[in-house]
Amino acid sequence: EKSQSPNKSTVQQQILVEKNKNGNLGLFNKLQKERKNLPIFKHRQGLLDKIKSNQISVIAGETGCGKTTQIPQYLIEEGLNKNRMIAVTQPRRVAAITIAQRVAQEMNTTVGNKVGYSVRFEEAVDKNNTKLLYMTDGMLLRETIVDPNLSRFSIIVIDEAHERTINSDLLISLLKQLSERRKDLKIIIMSATIETEKFANFFETENIIYLEGRCHPIEVFYSKKPHADYLDAALNTILQIHFEEQDGDILCFLVGQEDIEDMQQMLEEKIELFPKEAKKLNICTLYAALPSHLQLLAFEKSQEGERKVVLSTNIAETSVTIDGIKYVVDPGLVKTRKYNPNKLIEMLLVVPVSKSSAMQRAGRAGRQSAGKCFRLYTKYTHDTLAEFMLPEILRSNLSTVILQMKAIGIKDVKGFQFIDRPHEDQFIESIENLQQMNALDANENITLHGKEMAELPLEPIYAHFMLVAFATNPNSISVVLSAISLMQVENLFFIPKGAKISLLDVLLRFQLGNSDQLTKVNMLHQYYLAKNKKSFCKENFINQKNIKKALEVRQQLENYFLDILKKRSKKNQKQNQANIQQQSEEQQIQEELAKGNTLKKLQEEHKTAIQQEINTEEFISCIAKGLSVKAAKLNNDGTYTIIRSNIQAYIHPESLLFYSKPKPDYIIFNEVVSTIKTYLRDITEISFSDFKEISK
Ligand code: ADP
Ligand code: MG
């Protein structure tokens, strides 16, 4: 059992309890009425009959008709869960959390009781009480490693299957196998009205249930000309809607947190200048890294005479429904992962959406009445868009998937039945990659190291880094935990437009060694120790939300890490017991100690907690070893060559080392960013001897 983060969920519960005090029964009754008004309600019995009489059901329906929130409740109302849990998977953490909160309200309870959620680095579950668990597909996948039969559950719902994330694809394949072993397990695949046949064919079932939605006409407008600056175009469109269109809220799709924050700021500046008599415009934001109590704000109803604009990433495309939206602003872009197997690099890129995404987005405008969708691209561009997005599994590095499959016990990964089979090169490359990290041996079997890596909720490279660092120098683990946590969050700094300070100035305040990583760790530790955290962030242009997030992630990683150590020590004990028949006194004491070995003790023993002192050299030799696949070497012309892939790149201007003179000969980077040039980001200088050591 992974430890919960009680603080977080109690805070959320408190928020809900507060809300409940203010007329909860009224809310509950209101919600019951709303439930009966959803399009899905009249299909209730038919749905249940089909689900009862089939092991596998494929359900397709328009976004917003009630699949995610209602079907699981129907199943519980009918007792189909049979005293076990129902899992409902979501591709995104935000969706899992907000939907659990919504359903808890509908069931007149709070999250963490009858209804819970489980996402990476955060969960609210009551082992004895929770009947309905909304979880990310990644979390359910992890569970299959520990319990391949998923015995906690009687029904598993894979939701948003049309998104074709790697995790949900893999789960669907595993569930097909599991359905043979567990005839009592019910499997429900839910998707928007695309790809339905594909899933049914994969499961060899004819049990497809189509739910009709309720969508009002939507008028679509295109731009006459392409826009040079999409944020600017979106800003103008939002303002135009606000001043010229009738009541109704606005949903604007943006590509990421950074753009959302920029837009928020630009809008706030414009609102300052609104004439007195203008209608009030409230700004809400919605993106994965936003704490859930802030996400909830986007779902609150607008007051009479006010308008709300929700600035959202792709999450609002299908996973969550925001009531009251009548206008959609769609720049037609999405941030996505793209992998280039020839170059061995994976990048986050902003790319045009597919036609089916564009249609989904527009559909968000017509939930309650006729709506309008403003596409910030031309009709011509729309005609050139791809019909669907390529499934993630076909455009990703497979290292994580393969390691997980191996940890689950699937020996022949290439022979595995995928919905869409990845390319041969993707397999070869990722297996080599895992072998280089010693996660797989020469025969492609998982090693002990690989098994431990799979237990950590991190990309293999970071899991490898953590374990190798600890093996290299146990004293470095505290700093390494901090460094890895920081690598999991984006946008640590927020420097407002027009500020007289640059990111480099801020970094210089915390500089430690010739290393972006150490510098950021230093900042994180100073934040942790700071008495007044808010003013610390303000003075240093730190995005407090995100640095808090980094600390939360660190806490979780520390727990996972200590779990691994506990397992190691248990294993050692068993071995010792087998070796020595007669236990010595010394050993008995050891055992007693181990029994009472609380997390705290382990933490002290292994120095995982945040300490003031940071040993620069220790860290640098650890990062050189742990992230050796990310080593690069200086060329005569000032560029760097990435050793593993032979790509040439520049140091990113936001790195402390950008201005270093002379330029460091050997570096470890964390990220490759390609725009017009290829840049290396987050850099640590390493020594020649370290470099020689790792390039052997
Ligand atoms: P589907 O899964 O079919 O897309 P959902 O079950 O997510 O639909 O949502 C059904 C309806 O429930 C939505 O159309 C909306 O009216 C309401 N709803 C869902 N989540 C929320 C929420 N967090 N706040 C307010 N209403 C919500
Ligand atoms: Mg849904």
Image (cartoon, rainbow, N blue to C red):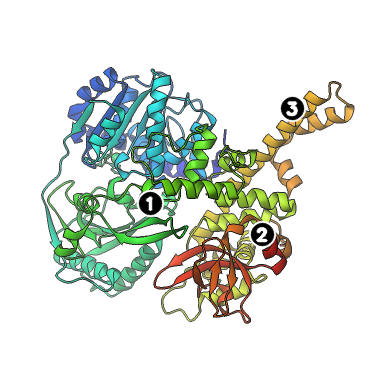
Q: Which mark is residue 694?
A: 2
In the figure, is residue 352 to the left or right of 658? left
In the figure, is residue 284 to the left or right of 540? left
CA–CA distance between discs 2 and 1?
Answer: 29 Å
Secondary structure under tag 1 reads: helix
Q: Nearer the viewer, mark 1 or mark 3?
A: 1
CA–CA distance between discs 1 and 3?
Answer: 44 Å
The earlier-in-sequence mark between 2 and 1 is 1
| Dot 3 crowding, Cα within 10 Å, few <14, some 14–19, many 20+ | few
Q: Tell me the quarter of the picture where residue 31 sits.
A: top left
Q: Position of residue 347 (x, y in %)?
A: 43, 59
CA–CA distance between discs 2 and 3?
Answer: 35 Å
Q: Nearer the viewer, mark 2 or mark 1?
A: 2
The earlier-in-sequence mark between 2 and 3 is 3
Secondary structure under tag 2 reads: helix
Residue type, mark 1 in image: Arg
Residue type, mark 2 in image: Ile
Q: Position of residue 97 (x, y in %)?
A: 41, 43
Which residue position is annotated with label 3? 574
Q: Position of residue 28 (x, y in %)?
A: 31, 34
Secondary structure under tag 3 reads: helix
The residue shown at (45%, 52%) is 291
Q: Nearer the viewer, mark 2 or mark 3?
A: 2
Residue type, mark 3 in image: Lys
Quadrant the C terminus occupies:
bottom right
The earlier-in-sequence mark between 1 and 3 is 1
Residue 133 versus residue 350 in the image, above or below: above
Which residue position is annotated with label 1? 395
Residue 173 versus residue 380 in the image, above or below: above
Q: Would residue 37 be visible to someone looking at this image? A: no
| Dot 1 crowding, Cα within 10 Å, few <14, some 14–19, many 20+ | some
